[in-house]
Amino acid sequence: MTSRPVTVGRRAGPAGLLLVAAAAAWVWVVTGWGGMRAVPGTMGLGLPAFLAVWALMMAAMMLPATTPVAALYARTITVHRAPRMVVFTVAYLLVWAAAGLPAYALAVGLGRATSLPTMAGTAVAAAVFAVSGVYQLTPLKDRCLARCRSPLGLMLRYASYPGRSRDLRAGAHHGAFCLGCCWSLMVLLAAFGLMNLWAMVVLAAVISAEKLVPAGPRVARAVGIASIALAVAVFWVPALAPGLTGGGMTGM
């Protein structure tokens, strides 16, 4: 009679902790940047500050969709579950934090693109939409998404990792697949504005749908087609990419 609640608690614990961490990151983003206008570039941040903001954004957007994998991985841990799950989660987030380096370089370049004539900025926005959309339709996207959606094979791989580095390696490995799955969606923030909270909410919902709902692969393809359509439409409606065309969209 008592075994079932214990099992449920073990499953819910890691997922609940990740959701709490994601909620805390969302609170920080909303309270710290909620009234900020969606602007191109780095928002005036230097590299260290940009990486800190980026890491918190990734925690807010990515952790909710990662909870099922974290809960499954936790079931493979028999001792010291809580601290080891912290290591797993930190390693996962470090991969996304490292992705902030190319994101910063991209933001610097796109910030400079705003000094170009309006049509050139619109062309850059179209290129961002097109790159994101095309990748959404590639076999590599499908492969990474499949690993995120059905991670049982990964669990067997992680179980073979020896020593104390197992949780670090497992978190980083899963983070790499997650990055391969979702980087194209993060690129869209360059077009919508890095701290555009509406864009963050919508993209976080898309990420969760791709990974968690039965129709996730179809959602990924639909988003890819929509992004390619935006690459064409932005020439007629530049406000679709306020982060690059000065469309004037605010963060909330």
Image (spheres, grey):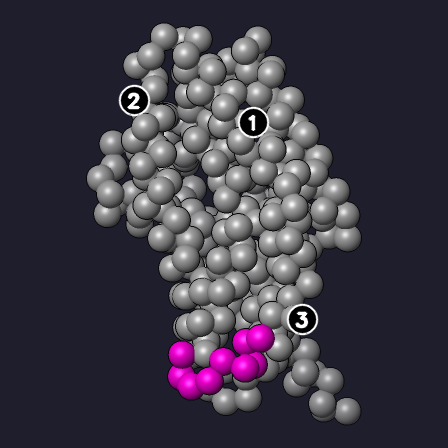
**Location of residue 77 (image quadrant):** bottom right
Is residue 246 rendered to the left or right of residue 203?
left
For the record, the magenta segment spans 157-165
Residue 97 rendering spot, x and y as whole percentages: 37, 53
Residue ID at (51%, 13%) = 238
SS under mark 1: helix
Main SS category, magenta section: loop
Marks 3 and 1 sit apart, C-alpha to C-alpha, by 33 Å
Residue 52 rendering spot, x and y as whole percentages: 31, 50
Marks 1 and 2 sit apart, C-alpha to C-alpha, by 20 Å
Rendered position, 9 above or below 112: below
Type of amino acid at the residue the image marks with label 2: Arg
Q: Is residue 193 magenta?
A: no
Rendered position, 66 above or below 34: below
Residue 35 rendering spot, x and y as whole percentages: 39, 31
Determine crowd level at label 2: few under 14, some 14-19, many 20+ residues with C-alpha closer than 10 A. some
The residue indicated by pointer 2 is 112
The residue indicated by pointer 1 is 130
Type of amino acid at the residue the image marks with label 1: Ala
